[in-house]
Amino acid sequence: MSVTLKQVFNKDKTFRPKRKLELGTQRFELHKWAQASLNSGVDLKSAVRLPCGEDVSDWVAVHVVDFFNRINLIYGTVCEFCTEKSCPVMSGGPRYEYRWQDEHKYKKPTALPAPQYMNLLMDWIEMQINNEEIFPTSTEIPFPKNFIQICKKIMCRLFRVFVHVYIHHFDRILQMAAEAHVNTCYKHFYNFSIEFNLIDHKELEPLKDMTSRMDL
């Protein structure tokens, strides 16, 4: 029996605090617009399109924060089953392995257990979206020139969470009867990524067959 999204994605299982958009700001209004479009049953390809007269960086910023929050919750539902024993390497099946690299501890691509990789991934994204110089909360502060490039890296890394969850932990999602919610989130994420060219097609390969069977 299907359960509600609120029941499935318990806020206590969230890896990180949700980044909230400030009430009354232009970006909060864009967030409400985006949510209203989704809830109205509008075709997802139409829902992700940039509203007339709006700035593309604002639209991307709102969605990147929302995707981080949602995917954070999705992984939170399976994280107790994603252990160093069950997932000794961050992967998407036998053909795809993801190695972590950053500017601090892991300066070369390093193989890590999936839960450790996920922690680093969520930490890194949280740092980006909470950095006022990258994701300014005031519309009076301009986005950095490399903003879209940063968002591409964020979206690429978030996609890897979907890959791991779908390939290694989807049985848990099925047990919770939450597949419809996860699939909807994935479709929204995928369509947005394609609309704004935010993920390289090579990165999409691990879920290519599944995606082709979905009603996108």
Image: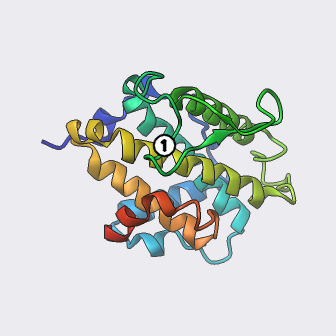
Q: Is residue 156 left or right of 85 when viewed as pictured?
A: right
Image x and y of residue 74, in percent: 42, 39
Q: Is residue 148 left or right of 178 when viewed as pictured?
A: right
Query: Which quadrant, please, contains the N terminus?
Result: top left
- Residue for badge 1: 71
Query: Which quadrant, please, contains the C terminus?
Result: bottom left
Q: Is residue 26 visible?
A: no
Image x and y of residue 122, in percent: 61, 34
Q: Secondary structure at mark 1?
A: helix
Q: Residue at x 58, y 55 (%)?
A: 63
The three-letter code of the residue at mark 1 reads Ile
Q: Residue at x 72, y 37 (%)?
A: 130
Image x and y of residue 13, in percent: 43, 25
Quarter of the image holding residue 22?
A: top right
Question: Relative to 56, does residue 166 appear above or below in the rendering?
Answer: above
Q: Residues within 10 Å of mark 1 (few under 14, many from 20)?
A: many
Image x and y of residue 151, in percent: 70, 54
Q: Is residue 82 visible?
A: yes
